[in-house]
Image: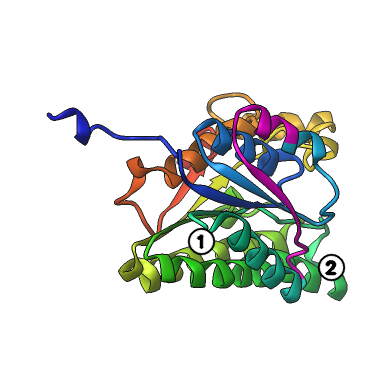
Amino acid sequence: MNSTNFPSFDLHGQTALVTGAARGIGHACTLALAHAGADVILGLRDGNSAAELAAEIEGMGRRTLRLQMDITKLEEIRTAVGAAVKHFGRLDILVNNTGLGPSNLAENVREEDFDFTLAVNLKGTFFVSQEVGRVMIQQKYGRIINLSSQAGFVALPTESVYCMTKAAINHLTKCLAVEWAEHNITVNAVAPTFINTPGTAKALGDEAFRADVLSRIPLGRIGEPMEVAGAVVFLASPAASFITGDTLLIDGGWTAR
Protein backbone atom coordinates (compact mmCIF):
# COMPACT_ATOMS: atom_id res chain seq x y z
CA MET A 1 0.00 0.00 0.00
CA ASN A 2 1.26 3.46 -0.87
CA SER A 3 1.99 5.52 2.25
CA THR A 4 -0.33 8.27 1.04
CA ASN A 5 -3.22 5.85 1.61
CA PHE A 6 -2.47 5.37 5.29
CA PRO A 7 -5.04 6.88 7.69
CA SER A 8 -4.26 10.46 8.67
CA PHE A 9 -5.26 12.03 11.97
CA ASP A 10 -3.56 15.34 11.16
CA LEU A 11 -5.69 18.48 11.50
CA HIS A 12 -3.07 21.09 10.60
CA GLY A 13 -4.53 23.99 8.66
CA GLN A 14 -8.05 23.35 9.89
CA THR A 15 -10.22 25.47 12.18
CA ALA A 16 -12.49 23.99 14.82
CA LEU A 17 -15.30 25.47 16.90
CA VAL A 18 -16.11 23.81 20.23
CA THR A 19 -19.18 24.90 22.16
CA GLY A 20 -19.15 24.66 25.95
CA ALA A 21 -15.37 24.68 25.72
CA ALA A 22 -14.53 25.90 29.21
CA ARG A 23 -14.56 22.65 31.16
CA GLY A 24 -14.96 18.89 31.16
CA ILE A 25 -15.27 17.16 27.80
CA GLY A 26 -15.32 20.45 25.90
CA HIS A 27 -12.06 21.52 27.54
CA ALA A 28 -10.45 18.19 26.62
CA CYS A 29 -11.71 18.40 23.03
CA THR A 30 -10.19 21.84 22.50
CA LEU A 31 -6.79 20.65 23.69
CA ALA A 32 -6.94 17.41 21.71
CA LEU A 33 -7.93 19.21 18.51
CA ALA A 34 -5.13 21.73 19.01
CA HIS A 35 -2.67 18.91 19.68
CA ALA A 36 -3.74 17.34 16.37
CA GLY A 37 -2.93 20.62 14.61
CA ALA A 38 -6.18 22.60 14.46
CA ASP A 39 -6.74 26.21 15.41
CA VAL A 40 -9.57 26.24 17.93
CA ILE A 41 -12.42 28.66 18.58
CA LEU A 42 -13.84 28.51 22.08
CA GLY A 43 -17.61 28.94 22.22
CA LEU A 44 -18.31 30.14 25.75
CA ARG A 45 -21.35 31.12 27.77
CA ASP A 46 -19.05 33.79 29.24
CA GLY A 47 -16.81 35.05 26.46
CA ASN A 48 -14.32 36.44 28.98
CA SER A 49 -13.68 33.07 30.60
CA ALA A 50 -11.18 30.31 29.71
CA ALA A 51 -8.15 32.58 29.42
CA GLU A 52 -5.87 29.83 30.74
CA LEU A 53 -7.24 27.34 28.21
CA ALA A 54 -6.66 29.81 25.37
CA ALA A 55 -3.10 30.35 26.58
CA GLU A 56 -2.49 26.60 26.67
CA ILE A 57 -3.71 26.26 23.07
CA GLU A 58 -1.48 29.13 21.97
CA GLY A 59 1.39 27.46 23.81
CA MET A 60 1.01 24.56 21.36
CA GLY A 61 1.57 27.00 18.51
CA ARG A 62 -2.08 27.13 17.52
CA ARG A 63 -4.33 30.13 17.07
CA THR A 64 -7.42 30.54 19.20
CA LEU A 65 -10.36 32.87 19.67
CA ARG A 66 -12.73 33.14 22.64
CA LEU A 67 -16.31 33.99 21.71
CA GLN A 68 -19.47 34.80 23.63
CA MET A 69 -21.85 32.01 22.66
CA ASP A 70 -24.85 31.18 24.79
CA ILE A 71 -26.47 28.65 22.48
CA THR A 72 -29.96 29.38 23.81
CA LYS A 73 -29.66 32.79 22.10
CA LEU A 74 -29.81 32.60 18.33
CA GLU A 75 -28.34 36.06 17.89
CA GLU A 76 -25.27 35.06 19.89
CA ILE A 77 -24.89 31.96 17.70
CA ARG A 78 -25.03 34.06 14.52
CA THR A 79 -22.66 36.69 15.88
CA ALA A 80 -20.13 34.14 17.13
CA VAL A 81 -20.07 32.11 13.92
CA GLY A 82 -19.75 35.29 11.87
CA ALA A 83 -16.85 36.47 14.02
CA ALA A 84 -15.14 33.08 13.73
CA VAL A 85 -15.36 33.08 9.94
CA LYS A 86 -14.21 36.68 9.73
CA HIS A 87 -11.20 35.93 11.94
CA PHE A 88 -10.10 32.59 10.44
CA GLY A 89 -11.67 32.68 6.98
CA ARG A 90 -13.33 29.28 7.33
CA LEU A 91 -14.79 26.69 9.71
CA ASP A 92 -13.82 23.08 9.13
CA ILE A 93 -14.88 21.32 12.34
CA LEU A 94 -17.78 21.84 14.74
CA VAL A 95 -18.02 20.06 18.08
CA ASN A 96 -21.49 20.53 19.58
CA ASN A 97 -20.49 19.88 23.17
CA THR A 98 -22.83 22.06 25.23
CA GLY A 99 -25.45 20.09 27.14
CA LEU A 100 -27.14 19.71 30.50
CA GLY A 101 -29.72 17.62 32.31
CA PRO A 102 -31.33 18.53 35.63
CA SER A 103 -32.12 15.29 37.49
CA ASN A 104 -35.62 14.56 38.71
CA LEU A 105 -38.14 11.76 38.82
CA ALA A 106 -40.42 11.94 35.78
CA GLU A 107 -43.47 12.67 37.89
CA ASN A 108 -41.71 15.67 39.45
CA VAL A 109 -40.11 17.29 36.38
CA ARG A 110 -40.78 21.03 36.27
CA GLU A 111 -41.81 22.66 33.02
CA GLU A 112 -39.02 25.22 33.26
CA ASP A 113 -36.40 22.46 33.57
CA PHE A 114 -37.96 20.54 30.67
CA ASP A 115 -37.94 23.64 28.45
CA PHE A 116 -34.38 24.63 29.37
CA THR A 117 -32.99 21.14 28.74
CA LEU A 118 -34.58 21.05 25.29
CA ALA A 119 -33.47 24.62 24.57
CA VAL A 120 -29.83 23.72 25.20
CA ASN A 121 -29.52 20.09 24.17
CA LEU A 122 -31.78 20.12 21.11
CA LYS A 123 -32.63 23.61 19.92
CA GLY A 124 -29.15 24.95 20.61
CA THR A 125 -27.42 22.03 18.92
CA PHE A 126 -29.68 22.31 15.89
CA PHE A 127 -29.22 26.05 15.35
CA VAL A 128 -25.45 25.99 15.92
CA SER A 129 -25.30 23.18 13.35
CA GLN A 130 -27.48 25.19 10.98
CA GLU A 131 -25.36 28.34 11.21
CA VAL A 132 -22.06 26.49 10.86
CA GLY A 133 -23.56 24.15 8.26
CA ARG A 134 -24.30 27.13 6.00
CA VAL A 135 -20.61 28.04 6.10
CA MET A 136 -19.55 24.45 5.42
CA ILE A 137 -21.98 24.15 2.50
CA GLN A 138 -20.31 27.16 0.88
CA GLN A 139 -16.89 25.64 1.53
CA LYS A 140 -17.98 22.21 0.25
CA TYR A 141 -16.30 20.70 3.31
CA GLY A 142 -17.04 20.15 6.97
CA ARG A 143 -16.94 17.80 9.93
CA ILE A 144 -19.64 18.04 12.62
CA ILE A 145 -19.42 16.00 15.81
CA ASN A 146 -22.35 16.08 18.24
CA LEU A 147 -22.12 15.13 21.91
CA SER A 148 -24.73 12.50 22.55
CA SER A 149 -24.68 10.12 25.52
CA GLN A 150 -25.22 6.48 26.34
CA ALA A 151 -28.41 7.95 27.87
CA GLY A 152 -29.67 8.11 24.30
CA PHE A 153 -29.55 4.30 24.21
CA VAL A 154 -30.37 3.17 27.76
CA ALA A 155 -32.73 4.50 30.40
CA LEU A 156 -31.21 6.29 33.38
CA PRO A 157 -33.53 6.81 36.37
CA THR A 158 -34.28 10.49 37.13
CA GLU A 159 -32.95 11.48 33.68
CA SER A 160 -35.99 11.01 31.44
CA VAL A 161 -35.76 14.43 29.79
CA TYR A 162 -31.99 14.25 29.31
CA CYS A 163 -32.28 10.71 27.87
CA MET A 164 -34.97 11.89 25.48
CA THR A 165 -32.85 14.75 24.17
CA LYS A 166 -29.81 12.56 23.64
CA ALA A 167 -31.84 9.99 21.72
CA ALA A 168 -33.03 12.88 19.56
CA ILE A 169 -29.43 13.99 19.00
CA ASN A 170 -28.64 10.54 17.60
CA HIS A 171 -31.42 10.88 15.04
CA LEU A 172 -30.64 14.52 14.24
CA THR A 173 -27.10 13.35 13.50
CA LYS A 174 -28.47 10.94 10.88
CA CYS A 175 -30.78 13.55 9.37
CA LEU A 176 -28.04 16.16 8.94
CA ALA A 177 -25.62 13.53 7.64
CA VAL A 178 -28.03 12.55 4.88
CA GLU A 179 -28.93 16.13 3.92
CA TRP A 180 -25.38 17.48 3.86
CA ALA A 181 -23.45 14.53 2.43
CA GLU A 182 -23.65 16.05 -1.05
CA HIS A 183 -21.67 19.04 0.26
CA ASN A 184 -18.82 16.84 1.55
CA ILE A 185 -19.93 17.37 5.15
CA THR A 186 -19.93 14.45 7.56
CA VAL A 187 -22.04 14.51 10.70
CA ASN A 188 -21.41 12.05 13.52
CA ALA A 189 -21.88 11.84 17.27
CA VAL A 190 -20.08 10.42 20.27
CA ALA A 191 -22.02 8.94 23.16
CA PRO A 192 -20.05 8.73 26.40
CA THR A 193 -20.99 6.98 29.62
CA PHE A 194 -20.25 8.66 32.96
CA ILE A 195 -16.99 10.59 32.60
CA ASN A 196 -14.91 12.22 35.34
CA THR A 197 -15.95 15.86 34.86
CA PRO A 198 -17.17 18.68 37.11
CA GLY A 199 -20.70 17.90 35.90
CA THR A 200 -20.63 14.32 37.19
CA ALA A 201 -18.57 14.90 40.34
CA LYS A 202 -21.54 15.18 42.70
CA ALA A 203 -23.29 12.04 41.43
CA LEU A 204 -20.12 9.97 41.30
CA GLY A 205 -19.23 11.19 44.79
CA ASP A 206 -22.12 9.11 46.12
CA GLU A 207 -20.54 5.74 46.91
CA ALA A 208 -23.65 3.68 46.22
CA PHE A 209 -24.27 5.43 42.89
CA ARG A 210 -20.63 5.07 41.84
CA ALA A 211 -20.66 1.38 42.72
CA ASP A 212 -23.81 0.85 40.65
CA VAL A 213 -22.26 2.64 37.66
CA LEU A 214 -19.05 0.63 37.90
CA SER A 215 -21.02 -2.62 38.11
CA ARG A 216 -22.47 -1.84 34.69
CA ILE A 217 -19.17 -1.00 32.95
CA PRO A 218 -17.24 -4.13 31.91
CA LEU A 219 -13.94 -2.19 31.81
CA GLY A 220 -14.54 -1.46 35.48
CA ARG A 221 -13.73 2.23 35.70
CA ILE A 222 -15.05 5.71 35.02
CA GLY A 223 -13.97 7.28 31.73
CA GLU A 224 -11.74 10.31 31.35
CA PRO A 225 -12.47 13.40 29.19
CA MET A 226 -9.51 12.76 26.89
CA GLU A 227 -10.94 9.33 26.07
CA VAL A 228 -13.95 11.10 24.58
CA ALA A 229 -11.77 13.75 22.94
CA GLY A 230 -9.79 11.04 21.16
CA ALA A 231 -12.93 9.84 19.41
CA VAL A 232 -13.83 13.42 18.49
CA VAL A 233 -10.40 13.97 16.90
CA PHE A 234 -10.79 10.71 14.96
CA LEU A 235 -14.20 11.71 13.58
CA ALA A 236 -12.85 15.16 12.66
CA SER A 237 -9.83 13.71 10.89
CA PRO A 238 -9.27 12.46 7.33
CA ALA A 239 -9.12 8.93 8.78
CA ALA A 240 -12.90 9.07 9.29
CA SER A 241 -13.75 10.51 5.87
CA PHE A 242 -16.15 7.65 4.99
CA ILE A 243 -18.05 7.67 8.27
CA THR A 244 -21.23 9.73 8.55
CA GLY A 245 -24.55 9.46 10.36
CA ASP A 246 -23.00 7.30 13.06
CA THR A 247 -23.04 7.57 16.85
CA LEU A 248 -19.95 6.09 18.49
CA LEU A 249 -20.51 4.75 21.99
CA ILE A 250 -17.72 5.46 24.47
CA ASP A 251 -19.13 3.55 27.40
CA GLY A 252 -16.59 0.99 28.55
CA GLY A 253 -18.92 -1.73 27.29
CA TRP A 254 -22.05 -0.71 29.26
CA THR A 255 -24.44 -1.11 26.32
CA ALA A 256 -22.74 -4.27 25.05
CA ARG A 257 -24.10 -6.27 27.99
Tag 2 secondary structure: helix
Residue 257 in the figure: left or right of residue 127: left
| Whether residue 118 can be seen here | no
- The answer for how far apart the CA atoms under marks 2 and 1 are is 21 Å
Residue 45 in the figure: left or right of residue 140: right
| Whether residue 45 can be seen here | yes
Highlighted magenta segment, given as a residue range: 55-72
Amino acid marked by disc 1? Asn
Question: From the image, which quarter does the N terminus lie in?
Answer: top left
Query: Crowdedness of circle 1 by 10 Å Cα count: few (<14), some, many (20+)?
Result: many
| Labels 2 and 1: the sequence-earlier one | 2
Q: Is residue 59 magenta?
A: yes
Tag 1 secondary structure: helix
The numbered dot on residue 170 is 1
**Marks 2,1: beta carbons within 8 A:** no
- Please state the horizontal and vertical placement of residue 256, each as a whole percent of the image: 45, 40
- Please state the horizontal and vertical placement of residue 156, each as a whole percent of the image: 68, 52
- Please state the horizontal and vertical placement of residue 195, each as a whole percent of the image: 67, 36
Amino acid marked by disc 2? Asp
| Colour scheme shown | rainbow
Q: Tell me the residue that label 2 is attached to.
A: 113
- Please state the horizontal and vertical placement of residue 22, each as a whole percent of the image: 76, 44
Using the image as rendered, state which of residue 209 and residue 21 is in the foreground: 21
- Residue in the picture at 75% in, 61% down: 69
Q: Which residue is outermost to the left?
A: 1
- Residue in the picture at 41% in, 55% down: 246
Q: Is residue 144 above or below residue 119?
A: above
Q: Is residue 38 above or below residue 176?
A: above
Residue 226 in the figure: left or right of residue 118: left
Query: Crowdedness of circle 2 by 10 Å Cα count: few (<14), some, many (20+)?
Result: some
